[in-house]
Image: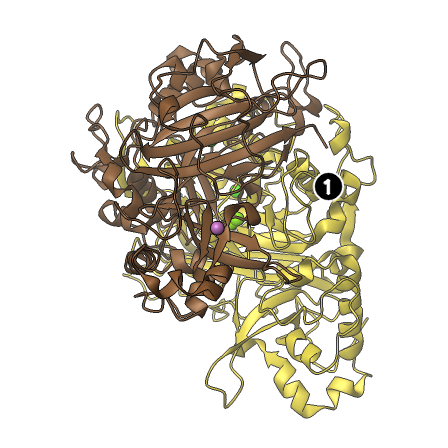
Chain colours: A yellow, B brown
C-alpha cells in the first residue's frame, strides 16, 4: 500500500491510491477573497494541483495545455486525455508519498497547497455542457414500466436493443451540499379530468452513477465502442431528483421535463478509472437478444466496476419531537454492476449518429436497481409508486450524525464504515425514525459509493448529499 | 425611416431599424490571425460593437459590465437585460445615422469597425448552455400524432394544458452555413422483428423559431408569466434536423434522442424584440380549455410577432444532369403566428418548477405548421410520413443562385424579395427540379423569415442554411 505524509484513516474514501479530482473554493488565511483550486482529495485534505503546478510541479503532462490547472474547472484537464491523467496521477502519488520530501518539507508550500477539507467549499468539478440521463438498469426500467404502463408494456420493444436515454438539463446540476426546493408543477390528481398547479407531492431521489467525459468527439464523428472507455475521465455519484407526479403528467410523448430539471446533484470528487482499476469486473453477456455490432461487447470485455452503492435518508425532525435529529436510515443498497448497459455502450450509442460529447459532459446511468427489494434505487420502486410505506430504520449509533455541507470527508467508522457495508438490504430492526412514501420537506438524501474495504484498500466516492426544502 | 451612411438596399433584411446581433470572425487586412467580433448587421455590412466600444463608444449601457462586447460571444450582453439592450440599440442607430459624423468621418475606425458581410465568417451568437425544443404548434402536434399514434391519440391529454417540450442537445447547435452529415442509427425496418443499424433514410428539416434567452433565473426561482418576455433577448430561425426513422424507434418512453442530436442549425443574427415591436400582434385566446393561472394570458396580451417564414430546398444536382444547379424550390410558407403557445408561456412553464434559464439558452418553438398543406413545417408532414412525393418547383429566375455559406446578406430581389413573398403555399407551376419524400444527400435547406416588406420597412432574419452531406 502507498503511504502519504498526509495522514489518511484506514477506512477513508480517499487514500493515496484514489486521488479523485475536484474543484473547490478556499480562502488563504489573511486573504480577503477566496480562490478556486483544482486538485485531488487525500484523506481529509484537498491537494491543490493549481498551487503545485504554479510552484513548478506537474509540468510534464503529455497532451495537456500549459497551465491546465489554472482555469478553476477541470474541463481542460478532462479534455487532455489518458496520458495526461496518468502522468498527473503518478506525479501526485510520488509527490505526496511519505518518503518524498519536496512538498513534505516545504512548509510554506504545504500551507498553500494542502487545504483541510473542513476549510473548503466544493464546487462542480467541471462546467457541464450537456447532461444525458440513461435508463440502463433492467430492473429499474421493468419496475417503472409495470407501474406506469402495466406489466404487458413494462419493457418497451427498443429497450433490449439500445441504451435508452434522454437529454437532461445542464443548468440543473448542483454539487453535493446544496439544498434544493420542492418544485411546483402541473399534476393530474387521481380521478381528475383536468390538471392542477401546485407543489409536487411525490418528490423522489434516484440513485445513479454518472460518467464524466474526457476528450469526446467533434460533431459528426462517432466514438467507436472499442475507444469509448478512453473518453471517460471518471465516475461520480448522481442523485436525479425527481417529481413523479409532474413527470407522469408531462412525459408523453417527448419525455421527462419539469419533473426532472429542477435539481440534479452530483458528488464533488470524480473517481478516475485508474483508481477503480483493481475493482474492474465484467457485466453478464447480452445474448437475448444479441445486440447490434456497434454495441456488441464480447465477454469478458463488458467492463464495469464493482462499486457498492447506498442511499441514506436523514429524516426531517418532526415538530413534536426532540428525537431523531440527524440520524440516518439506509433505504437502499445497490451496486454499479446492476446495469444492463455499460458506460462504453452508452458512449458508443450516444455518438453513433454524430452527436458530440465534450469534456465535462455527464452521462448518468439511470437509477441503479438490483434484483432484490432492498436494492431498488428510488422511492418510486421502494414504495411501489406510493402504495407501500417504507420504514426508515436507524442503523447508526446515536450521537453519530451525518455532517452537513459538502466537505470532503469519507464516512467515519460506524457511519458508513466497514461494519455497516457487510449488510444486505435496507436495514430492518433498527430504531424507527419515520415512514415515507415520498420525501418530506426537511429530509436529507445521501448517496454513498465505495469499492473494497473490509480489510483491503477502500476506494470511495465520498458523498452526494442534499436536503429537500419546502417550496420557495 | 432611418437612414444610415452605410448603404442599405430597400429590400434588405437588415435596415437600421433592425440591427440584429451576431458574432463573427474577421481578418483585418495585413493581420495574420482573425479576430472575433460582436455586433450588428446593417445591409451587407457587419458593424463591430467590439471595435466601437474599444474606441470609446457604447460605454453607457445600464446593467452591462464594462467591456461587455470583448468576450467573443453575446452571453454577457444577453445577460445584461433590456435597459442595456435598448441603450446599445439607440446609440448604434445614432452612430450609424447618415447625419452623424463621429464614425462616418473616421475612415480609420470605419475600416476596423465596419466589415463587409462577404469578408466574415458567422459564428454562433452565444455559447448555448442549454437548448430546449418545444412542440407549440397545434397543427404540427396533431399531424405528427395522427401519423405516429393514430387519430384517436393524436393530441395527448396534456397538450392543451401545457407547452410540451423536451431538453435538446447543446453540443449539436451549429450556425448557418455549416454542412451536416446524414446520421447512422438504429432503425426498425417496416415489418421487421429486430432493428438494424445504418444510414437514416428519413432525414428531415423542421422549421422553427427559437427564443434566445436574456438574464434568466437562478435555480429554484421561477420566472412569472408577466416577466417572461423581459427575459427574451431576441429570436432566431432554427432548423431542427431530424432523422425520423431513428426517432420513431427510440423515442418511447423518454423522448427523442439520436434522431435529433446530430445537428441543430440556427440563423446567426438574433433579431431583437425592439426591432420586431412594429410587428407585434396577438395570438388567439385559449379557451377550450382555459389554461391554469400560471400560464393564462388575457387577450390581447397573448403576444407574438407577425413573422413570415419559408423553407427552400436547393436540390442536389443529379449525376446524370447538368441542369437544376443551385435553383431553389420553396416547399413551405408559414408564420410565427401559427403557434398555440407563446414564448412567454414556454418561459413561465419551463421555470415553474425552478429550472434555471441562462443567457444564451435557446427555446425552440417546435415545428411551425399552419392550417394549410402548403404551410406544414417539415417533410414528415408535407409528404405525410413519406406516403406522398413532394414536387420541388423552381420559383427563382434561372441564374440567380442561393449563395453558399453564412454571409450576412438579405434575400435579393426575386430571390426571397417582395414579389415572391406575396404568394400563398408552396409554389406550383414552376419548373420541376425534383421530387422528395425525405432529403437526399447534397440537398440544401434554407429557412427564411421576415416581417413587413411590400412597400413598408422590412425586418428580416437572414437565412439559416445547411447542406446535407452523405454519411461520414
Ligand atoms: Ca434518472
Ligand atoms: Ca423540433
Ligand atoms: Mg449544453
Ligand atoms: Mg447545457
Ligand atoms: Ni463596404
Measured as percent of width and height from the top left, residue B24 is found at 53, 52
As drawn, is B4 to the left or to the right of A220?
A: left
Location of residue A82 with respect to B385 vertically, above or below: below
Residue at the image position 33 percent from the left and 48 percent from the top = B16
Q: Nearer the viewer, residue A79 or A374?
A: A79
Location of residue B300 with respect to B423 vertically, above or below: below
Measured as percent of width and height from the top left, residue A363 is found at 61, 46
- Does residue B56 appear in the picture of this structure? yes
Kind of element beneath mark 1? loop
Q: Nearer the viewer, residue A234 or B69?
A: B69
Residue A359 sits in which quadrant? bottom right
Measured as percent of width and height from the top left, residue B70 is found at 48, 65
Location of residue B113 with respect to B425 vertically, above or below: below
* Residue to which mark 1 is pinned: A223
Q: Residues within 10 Å of mark 1 (few under 14, many from 20)?
A: many
Some atom of ligand 3 lies within 8 Å of the CB belonging to the residue at label 1? no
Residue at mark 1: chain: A
Quarter of the image that includes the N terminus of chain B: top left
Q: Report the label total.
A: 1
Q: Nearer the viewer, residue A386 or A35?
A: A35
As drawn, is B248 to the left or to the right of B55?
A: right
As drawn, is A447 to the left or to the right of B441?
A: left
Residue A462 sits in which quadrant? bottom right
Quarter of the image that includes the C terminus of chain B: top right
Residue at the image position 61 percent from the left and 69 percent from the top = A413
Location of residue A253 with respect to B86 vertically, above or below: above
Amino acid at each position: 500500500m502507498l503511504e502519504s505524509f498526509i495522514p489518511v484513516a484506514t477506512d477513508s474514501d480517499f487514500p493515496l491510491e484514489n486521488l479523485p479530482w475536484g474543484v473547490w473554493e478556499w480562502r488563504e488565511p489573511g486573504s480577503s477573497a477566496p480562490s478556486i483550486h483544482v486538485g485531488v482529495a487525500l484523506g481529509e485534505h484537498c491537494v491543490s494541483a493549481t498551487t503545485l503546478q504554479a510552484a513548478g510541479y506537474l509540468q510534464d503532462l503529455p497532451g495537456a495545455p500549459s497551465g491546465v490547472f489554472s482555469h478553476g474547472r477541470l474541463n481542460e484537464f478532462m479534455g487532455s486525455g489518458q496520458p495526461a491523467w496518468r502522468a498527473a496521477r503518478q506525479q501526485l502519488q510520488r509527490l505526496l508519498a511519505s518518503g518524498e520530501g519536496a512538498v513534505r518539507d516545504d512548509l510554506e508550500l504545504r500551507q498553500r497547497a494542502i487545504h483541510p477539507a473542513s476549510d473548503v467549499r466544493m464546487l462542480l468539478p467541471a462546467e457541464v455542457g450537456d447532461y444525458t440521463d440513461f435508463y440502463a438498469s433492467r430492473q429499474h426500467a421493468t419496475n417503472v414500466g409495470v407501474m406506469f404502463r402495466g406489466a404487458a408494456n413494462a419493457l418497451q420493444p427498443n429497450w433490449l436493443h439500445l441504451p435508452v436515454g434522454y437529454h437532461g438539463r445542464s443548468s440543473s446540476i448542483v454539487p453535493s451540499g446544496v439544498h434544493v426546493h420542492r418544485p411546483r408543477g402541473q399534476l393530474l390528481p387521481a380521478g381528475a379530468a383536468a390538471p392542477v398547479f401546485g407543489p409536487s407531492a411525490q418528490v423522489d431521489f434516484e440513485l445513479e452513477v454518472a460518467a464524466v467525459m474526457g476528450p469526446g468527439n467533434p460533431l459528426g464523428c462517432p466514438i467507436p465502442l472499442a475507444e469509448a472507455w478512453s473518453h471517460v475521465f471518471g465516475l461520480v455519484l448522481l442523485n436525479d431528483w425527481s417529481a413523479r407526479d409532474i413527470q407522469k403528467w408531462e412525459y408523453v410523448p417527448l419525455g421527462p421535463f419539469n419533473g426532472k430539471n429542477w435539481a440534479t446533484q452530483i458528488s464533488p470528487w470524480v473517481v478516475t478509472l485508474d483508481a477503480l482499476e483493481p475493482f474492474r469486473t465484467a457485466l453478464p453477456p447480452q445474448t437475448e437478444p444479441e445486440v447490434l455490432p456497434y454495441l456488441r461487447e464480447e465477454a469478458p470485455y463488458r467492463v464495469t466496476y464493482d462499486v457498492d452503492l447506498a442511499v441514506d435518508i436523514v429524516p426531517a425532525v418532526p415538530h413534536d419531537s426532540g428525537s431523531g435529529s440527524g440520524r440516518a436510515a439506509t433505504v437502499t443498497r445497490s451496486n454499479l454492476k446492476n446495469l444492463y448497459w455499460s458506460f462504453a455502450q452508452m458512449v458508443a450509442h450516444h455518438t453513433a449518429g454524430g452527436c458530440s460529447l465534450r469534456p465535462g459532459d455527464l452521462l448518468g446511468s439511470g437509477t441503479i436497481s438490483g434484483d432484490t427489494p432492498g436494492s431498488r434505487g428510488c422511492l418510486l420502486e421502494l414504495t411501489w409508486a406510493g402504495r407501500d410505506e417504507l420504514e426508515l430504520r436507524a442503523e447508526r449509533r446515536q450521537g453519530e450524525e451525518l455532517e452537513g455541507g459538502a466537505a470532503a470527508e469519507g464516512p467515519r467508522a460506524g457511519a458508513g464504515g466497514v461494519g455497516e457495508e457487510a449488510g444486505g438490504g435496507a436495514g430492518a430492526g433498527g430504531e424507527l425514525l419515520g415512514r415515507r412514501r415520498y420525501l418530506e420537506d426537511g429530509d436529507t438524501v445521501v448517496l454513498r459509493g465505495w469499492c473494497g474495504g473490509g480489510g483491503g484498500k477502500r476506494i470511495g466516492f465520498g458523498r452526494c448529499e442534499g436536503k429537500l426544502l419546502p417550496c420557495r
